[in-house]
Structure formats: C-alpha cells, structure tokens
Amino acid sequence: MSGSEIFLQQLIIGLSNGMIIALIALGYTMVYGIIELINFAHGDLFMLGCFAGLTLIGLLGLDQAVAGTSGTWIGLILLLLIVPIFCGGLNWLVDRLAYRHLRESTKLAPLVSAIGVSFIFMNIGLLWGGIPMKVFGFGRAAAAPKAFPELVSNANLLGQSAVEFTGKDVMVFVVTLPLMALLTWFVRRTRAGKAMRAVAQDRLAAQLMGIPVDRVIGQTFLIGGGLAGVASVVFAVYNNTIYFQMGYRAGIDAFTAAVLGGIGSLPGAVLGGLVIGLARAFCDQYLETRWTNVLVFAVLILVLVFRPSGLFGSRAKEKV
Amino acid sequence: MLLQLEEVHAGYGAIEVLKGVSIGVEEGEIVAVLGANGAGKSTMLMTISGINRCRQGRILFDGEAIQNRPPHEIVQRGISQSPEGRRIFPRLSVRENLEMGAFQRGHGNGLGDDVERVFTAFPILKERQSQLGGTLSGGEQQMLAISRALMARPKLLLLDEPSLGLAPMVVTRIFNIIREINRQGTTILLVEQNANMALHVAHRGYVLETGRIVLEDTAANLISNEQVKRSYLGG
C-alpha cells in the first residue's frame, strides 16, 4: 500500500465511523438543546440497541446467514425499523420516569439521574449478554464481546485496488445521509420541529403559546433515541463486535463530537462526529491506537478550555 | 363575567405573592391592573395562564373553573398572553413566531389568513417575516409579541407591561393597537406600570398593592383619584 492509498483508506474508515458517531451525537445535542441535560445514558442506550439488534438476529435465525442474500437484506431493513423504535421508546420512557419529575429542580438533579440510568443500562447489557441464546454464546461469559454476523458483504467494491471500499461503507452513507436530511427537514419545516426549537429557545414563552412542553420534550427523547437505535444497527453491522461496555466509549466520542460542534447545534454534531471519526482513524494509523482515546479526551478538554461554545455554538457556556 | 378571580392565592415557595385577589373582567372590556414593581401583577397573569399554581381560590373563565389547568389547555380555552419582556423566540423567524402563537389551532384552520391579517396591520412585520425574531427592535418585538398572542384567536388577551422599555412615541402606537384590538372584539386584561397610558385605554381598573386589591373603579374615576395620582400618575 502506498502512502496515498493508506491515507485514502483511513479517510474512508474515518468518515464511516464518523457518520455513526454523528448519529449518536445528534441525540446528545438535541436533548441538551431542549432541556440542557447532558444525557450520560445516551451511549449506553446505543449499546442496548446493539444488543436488541443481535437478539432480533437470533430470533430471525439470521446468525448463520450469508451476506448479500435476500434474507440478510430483509433482516437489515427489519433491524433498521425495529431497533430505533426500541431505543426511541426506551429513551422516551426514561424521560417520563426519571427526568420529567425533575424539570423544575436544579440542573444537577437530572444529570445525576442520567448517570444512574447509564449504570442501570450497562448492567442490563451485562445481564442481556447472559441470556441463553445461541447468538449470545448460550449465556456463557455474559461480559465477553459478542460477534455480530456479517449482514452486509465485506467484499471490496473497488475490485483489485489496495484501498477497500466495501458494501458496509456504502450502507453507512445510504442510511445516515438521508436520515440527517430528514431530521433537518423535520426540525426546520414541520410544526412539531418548530415547536421543538421554540421550547429550546424559551420554554416559558412556548408554554404561553399553548405548546404542550412535556410532550415536545418527550418527542425529542423519542427522536434522539431513534437516531441512537439506527446508529446501533449501522455500527454493529459495520464493526461486527458488540459488548456491554461499548456505550461508554461511544458516548465519550459522541459527547466530544457534540461539544466540538457546539452543543445544541445539529450541523455542529454532524461535523463534530466526522472530525472525531477522522481523528480516530488517522491516530490509529499514524500514531498508535493506544493514543487514540487520549487524543479524543484531549480534544474534549481543549475545546472546553478554549472554545466552550464549540464550532457552531452560539450561547454562553452552561455550567454542568 | 368572562373572567373572574375569586380570592386567588399564589406565590413562590414560602413567599405568598397574591393574598386573596378577586377581580372580574366583562366581555368586551379593557381592564387595567396597576401596581408597583413586585405588587404581584405578573404573578396574577401567570396564575391565570396556568404557569403558577393557584394555591387557594378559584379562577372562572366563561363560568368554568380553570385554575391549575395545564397552560396549553388555558390557551385552547381562549386565553393567551403576551408576557413581560416580550419573550420572542429569538432564533425563529418572524413568521415562525406567529405560527407558534397558533400552535393549539394546528396548521390549516385559517393560519395563513391570520398571518396575512397581521401583515396587513403591521407591514413592518411582513417586511421582516423571514428575519429572526431576535433581530427586531423593541417596538417591533412588542408588535410581534401581541400579534403572536392574537394568533391563538383568544377571547381574552392578557398583556403584561406592553410599554416596558419602549420610546414614548412607540408606546403611543402600542396603546393605539391595543384599543384597536379591543374594538374588533377581543377582551383585554392589561397589566401596566405606565398607569397614565393604561388608564387612558382601559374602561375599568384595579390597583394591586403587595398582593391585595386596594382599589377598584372606572378608569375615569381612577385618573382623578387623589391616591392614584400620588402613587401612580406622578403627581
């Protein structure tokens, strides 16, 4: 592989992973935008989505399926429909049970709750890995990483080229780009989307306009969770390994992306996700993988110190 | 009586702001509530709108008790508010701000017609319809805030300090608008520190002092009342 081929390869990997990070970051940033809560459970919600996806694969009997057959395509589409509903519904439920009652209390209260929910989710993931299904290794070694079957072929679409651009990369972009366009349209053009922005900008004024604020906040959790669910499926199909602590790293990556882009900003979250994805890929290649997490944390700290409003952020910094 | 407050108590935490307030608003009236800063005027409006809890007493609208109903239900029943400080959505366009005022009615339902009506009444808002709300001047924001509250097609419009922070000429303009809105059939409950202006548009008035109604009369009588002159009309 020549130098430029290596660069191109890392660019592809970085962009694909970056799009996945961006999807998770969107859920962070939307919830923050509307109730100024850093939802620390968001990464773990993403993890549970992966486990739900693998369970579904087991139930559909797709664990031995060969990539590219009609069964795997149908399976992938089913996963992309059901897992987001699961994650969105779960996120909505958590807001309803754990955060809604704390709306009028100090900002620290829901934040601490979110950390608690994160632990609960992680332990549910651990238990989930122990259920006696074939896809989970019949429940032996619950904490061990689980293999996620190849639903999309890994064959190189560029033929004999040393640079690999596979169906998986295509899948990432085919799923995430239209979804982001849809989200942009929803937030900018629809009545519900405008209400969401109104609540984010001035909750009291929104109430006085007759906007049912709690329902709008619930919708935000639903959509943010749904995006995390899509990210779960795309991630699991792209990377083929899931484990119960994966939400922590994904959460840090996505949170950094959201802060980098300016928390509360949707385009910022996408750009931040791509930057983090690329930074990870290039760091893996040109430095060493063990420095990659250090790099992400360094970015987080540098942004918080020198530009807390991020690239697209407009508001003054909120204290968390 | 369109709106009736009966012995309403409300407050924040241990502090009681409204200590048994009773007022009434007849259909078609403009009623002004005067009072110094901290007398409880805004608290009263926020309690009517369902934002603050009514701890004791009743609020009747069209004969039905509406105290402690959720704010969106209050709007649905026909009471909308233009709050103190205007509270325009700063990063929504002027048109989107108006659309949010009609949220309870849903899209369709004559929304476009109502927006056009606002634009006819306030050409400046039409000119700036795609501009962000936060970029408007104070007077324009006040026009937008009142128009936005009217988008709900309320029977009763609550106005909290519509003259606050505006130049005298703009204040006159705003009060002419208020009179015109009332002439077209909307009942108005107006809370103001600018007692002079308020009493000149209102039919009746109340004076609120530290959470209690201390005076109630027609606007004309209140203007010539010695106590009101001394405390609220600057002489």
Image (tube, helix red, strand yellow):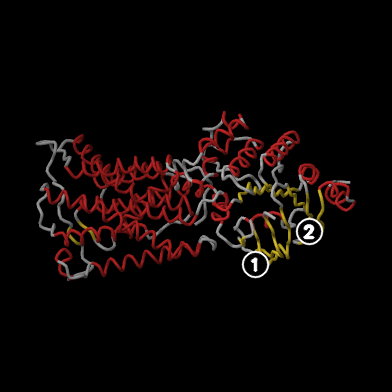
Residue at (57, 53) in percent of width and height = B77
In the picture, measured across the screen, residue A20 lies left or right of residue A201, that is left
- The image shows residue B109, relative to residue B126, as above or below, that is below
Snapshot quadrant of residue A242: bottom left
Residue A148 in picture, x, y percent from top left: 18, 57
Q: Which mark is residue B55?
A: 1
Q: Are labels 2 and 1 assigned to the same chain?
A: yes
- State which tag comes first along the sequence, 2 or 1: 1
Which callout, 2 or 1, points to the residue nearer the camera?
Answer: 1
Q: What amino acid does circle 2 point to?
A: Glu
Query: Between A271 and B122, which is closer to the camera in this rendering?
Result: B122
Snapshot quadrant of residue A138: bottom left
In the picture, measured across the screen, residue A73 lies left or right of residue B146, that is left
- Badge 2 crowding class, 10 Å Cα cut-off, few under 14, some 14 to 19, many 20 or more, is some
Query: Between B45 and A250, which is closer to the camera in this rendering?
Result: B45
Residue B29 in picture, x, y percent from top left: 72, 47
Local secondary structure at mark 2: strand
Query: Between B3 and A66, which is closer to the camera in this rendering?
Result: B3
Q: Which mark is residue B209?
A: 2
Q: What amino acid does circle 1 point to?
A: Arg
